[in-house]
Amino acid sequence: MVSMTRRERTAAVALTAWALAWFVIMAWNGGGSWHFFVQGAQALADTDDAIRGGLHTYAAAPVLQIGPVALLAAMAAMPAGAAGGLAIWQVLGAAAGLVVLWQVRQVGAAARPDLLHDGRLDRRVAAAAVCFVPVWLFLAVGVTHVDDVLALLFAVLALRATAVGRPVLTGALLGLAVDAKPWALPFGCLLLLLDGRRKALSAATTMTAVIAAAWLPFFLADPATSNALHFTIPNTELSALRVLGVHDARTPPWDRPAQAVLGTVLALLAWRRGRWAAMVLLAVGARVVLDPGTNKYYVAGVVVGAALWDVLGSRAEWPWWTATACLGLFTARWVPMPDAAHGRLALAYVSACAFLLITPAGAGTFSDRSGPTCEAAEMTIARRMANKVPEVTVYFWIIKVLATTVGETAADLLNMNLGLGLTWTTVVMGVLTAGALVLQFRSQRYVPWRYWLVVILISVVGTLITDNLVDNFGVPLEVTIAVFAAALAATFVLWHRSEHTLSIHTITTPRRESYYWAAILFTFALGTAAGDLLAERINVGYLPSAGIFAAAIALIALGFRLRVLGAVLAFWAAYVLTRPLGASLGDWLSQSRDDGGLGLGTVGPSVVFLLASVALVGYLTRSRVDAPAERPTTPAPVNARAYP
């Protein structure tokens, strides 16, 4: 047993006293949000109430923005009564903070052994704990938000599980984090730190299963559970949203989805840049930058992420990021200042965090991926395969247009004709697409039916994403087009910076394939929005819109033939435009005559185009006329004149 020095004992006693003092302070009139958990636990336990209880809880009370795991945790304490349950979870929540700090230390010991020898690791953890304790105890004791406590605890435990190479445990913990609080979804990016693609896939499968097990029963029992997805909260004068120009009295319906998307993108960028220790900080930072200013306990997630970075990634010996979050985002809420200053502070802090992604690499930042988990992330992209994308032939473009037409009509068929609604249609198609992608990624070569199955399913999902944003969340088509165009451009930039090519002749690693399918998804979503804008909003009509897009594709082909356009630019421009071409044709066939269509409905065109696609894919499977040619594995230049 290692004995502590006198200095270490003094520091431990002082830190313990500091924590106890803050526990007493926060417990005094604490538990500010506990009534939500009492209400939710009682409703969940009341399975006899077929309207407001049991699996109808979220449909009847969308204000309960709390995951089922957190409600079950609160329910477990209810035998002690509301007051007794509060006391139990205040103690457990405070203890969870100690577990978080200990796990940060353990991850540091595994990933930064260089900090162990002279005690620097323990000093970093202790210094970060000084700033961490007040903010965490406000969350766990002051407001007693059990859902956030569990989500952050599970996320840090999942990070520890990646360090020891436990994929199933990693996936289960990340799934439980989402089951405790849905905003934890961006933490799923942590599974990329596992050693090898097989382990990452195992973790992702486990995570998906755990999330589905908790949430699907509610959606299956009561489709109105989707009401919880659209619930809004007050957008106060302290809000960072107001600094960004959103002055509505309540949060816009796109706010929470935008938090999840932005958090995921930032976490992925952190992983890609080798700054994996900042993944949690950036994922939570997205929540704060779009924060309506209502809840001070959001800062606890920032402080957890900042502590991870200060201990594991920062070159500084003192926890400047944790201290700044504690003072600027938490303590400042009790300091008299103009309301708008709080939103500016939040925006400034998150912008500084995002700056981590573009600053030059330095020693001790893991940007060289020297730690064991970073080496594992690198190994997931090292293995080369045969090219998994077909040759670009006339069959490629025919099936592409057929697939886009099926995507448009099939989405309408499932949504309206079969009565699933946008939410359920999106869930079903998302699950099917995820399964098809698993099959595609497991293949070591181009298999026609697997490849084109993914294309057809992604075409439906791309349509549904745009329809959800426009119809469910009220995002204007113009904004949707701008967002997906930016997402597609960002994908291409990251792809080229990483692989030095955008050629589809070299889809020979899992990383390149990931970029490829991300680009495909964004082209479908962008094309859907562009087609709807031209045909419906500008009121050009379906058939004239199809003619416009066909003419644009013809111009691109001519530019390529005349060597005005490079192969990569010509291919991706044509790929984007075939989406609105197919969508316009699908709408022209299926929509009523009053709306400018032929009135054939969605069933007939969907079946005909799907059968045509299946027939062509069957022919390609037997003939292999589109099988990728053998090429050198060196990246092709971006301006190569051979078709990509």
Image (cartoon, grey):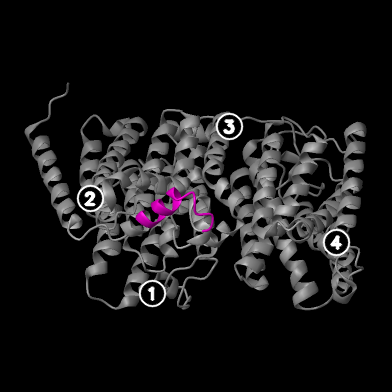
Residue on which disc 4 sits: 586
Residue 42 counted in the magenta span: yes
Residue situated in front as seen by the camera: 279 or 356: 279
Mark 4 or mark 1, which is nearer the start of the sequence? 1
Type of residue at label 3? Arg
Q: Secondary structure at mark 1?
A: loop
Examine the rendering and report whether any part of residue 303 can be seen: yes
Could you say which disc has been placed on residue 133 in the image?
A: 2
Distance from Cα at disc 2 to Cα at disc 3? 37 Å
Report the Cα–Cα distance between label 4 and label 2. Answer: 58 Å
Could you say which disc has been placed on residue 236 in the image? Answer: 1
Nearest to N terminus: mark 3 or mark 1? 3
Q: Residue 371: tell me if it is visible.
A: no
Between the residue at mark 3 and the residue at mark 1, the CA separation in whole angstroms equals 44 Å
Q: Which residue is mark 3?
A: 197
Q: Quadrant of the N terminus?
A: top left
Q: Amino acid at mark 1?
A: Thr
Start-end of magenta stretch: 38-51
Q: Are marks 2 and 3 in contact (CB under 8 Å)?
A: no
Please tell me which residue is depicted at 57% across the width and 46% down the height of the picture.
Answer: 217
- Label 2 is placed on what type of residue? Val
Label 2 secondary element? helix
Q: Earlier in the sequence, mark 4 or mark 2?
A: 2
